Image: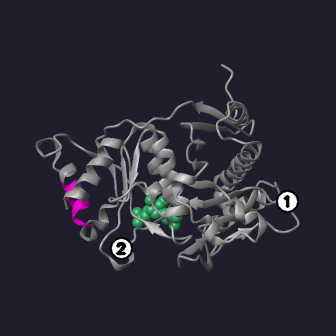
Amino acid sequence: MKRKTLTQYLVEQQRNGNAVTAELRLLLETVARACKGIGHAVTKGALGGVLGSLESENVQGEVQKKLDVLSNEILLEANEWGGNLMAMASEEMETIHRIPNEYPKGGYLLLFDPLDGSSNIDVNVSIGTIFSVLRAPEAASTREVEEADFLQPGTQQVAAGYAVYGPQSMLVLTVGNGVVGFTLDREMGTWVLTTESMTIPQDTSEFAINMSNMRHWEGPVKRYIDDCLAGETGPLAKNYNMRWIASMVADVHRIMTRGGIFMYPRDERPSGKKGKLRLMYEANPMSFIVEQAGGAATDGEQRILDAQPNALHQRIGVVMGSKNEVERVSRYHMED
Ligand code: AHM
Ligand code: MG
């Protein structure tokens, strides 16, 4: 069977007028190429001398792993010179990275978490890259692009995706026209379309949450997980299973594949009041993908994609996945 490559898929989307401009297509191909490079470094592990930590911390005060920094560099270098972008922003950089003057500028902004799931890097468990593409505001082309130009709600994303580096390397992508999945053909070095339309089942009996935070949870989250744990004699009348990989990309990829609900909620700790995950390059792209696959994503009170960001590294509570279950959690918040 002859399968489509990422390039073919994007050219088709461009021809069908699905908001994929030639510039966006080239940008997405470049990001996908960078993900191949990151996947390659991840696969080498100790043989590439890339495991372990550096002395440095990122803007969130987290110790940087060698692979976090390397992945960030791979994405910056790949995307700097193509002429499709005005600037980039990353979990690993305090502020935005403008395209240097020696290169032409384009009309898009790119945000990424270069390597998500840092605690899993050195233990050989699946990790991934998350990215989000926004249009640069018109006004930014006549002056220097600013951090404020990035602060657009998730509904404004023109594309989002993630790569998961696991037993297979996969790239999952949306350009606002459903969700497609590509598997890396390692011999050919190409991303090959293997899932034409990823959809999340509306119902589920599998939840993903870090249970060690239970004592800090807010009431509605506690109530929901209690109901799940009560099993078939409880209010939800079914038995639930639990999975927690601790790499958002891998946990959400499982949900994209067989349904489920993923939660990293706000909690009552001073450090947890705003949630753990970052809005602009974790929650927004993943919410766009999940919604495009028929799922839902909320912080408990509001749809994540509607949240108006006020800082590049802002955090948010995250509840996403199978629609009926996410709506149940929202209802519990309303009833609280
Ligand atoms: P990171 O961007 O520093 O890797 O942190 C984000 C990760 C998510 O991938 C994952 O869902 C979460 O942190 C796991 O956190 P915990 O270790 O508290 O379970
Ligand atoms: Mg992350």
Residue marked by disc 2: 273
| Mark number displayed over residue 104 | 1
User: Label 1 neighbourhood size at 10 Å, few (<14), some (14-19), many (20+)?
Assistant: some
- Magenta part, dominant SS: helix
**Numbered disc 1: secondary structure:** loop
Q: Is residue 164 above or below residue 333?
A: above
- Residue appearing at x 70%, y 39% in the figure: 186
User: Label 2 neighbourhood size at 10 Å, few (<14), some (14-19), many (20+)?
Assistant: some
Q: Which stretch appears magenta?
A: 218-226
**Quarter of image, res 223:** bottom left
Q: Is residue 290 magenta?
A: no
The amino acid beneath tag 2 is: Lys
- Image location (x, y in percent) of residue 190: 72, 38
- Residue appearing at x 45%, y 35% in the figure: 199
**Numbered disc 2: secondary structure:** loop
**Image quadrant containing the C terminus:** bottom left
The amino acid beneath tag 1 is: Pro
Mark before the other along the chain sequence, 2 or 1: 1
**Quarter of image, res 16:** top right
- Residue appearing at x 76%, y 63% in the figure: 141
* Residue furthest top as drawn: 1
Q: In screen coordinates, is 9 left or right of 62?
A: right
Q: In screen coordinates, is 103 left or right of 124?
A: right
Q: Is residue 223 magenta?
A: yes
**Total numbered badges shown on the rendered structure:** 2
| Mark number displayed over residue 145 | none
Which mark's residue is nearer the viewer, 2 or 1?
1
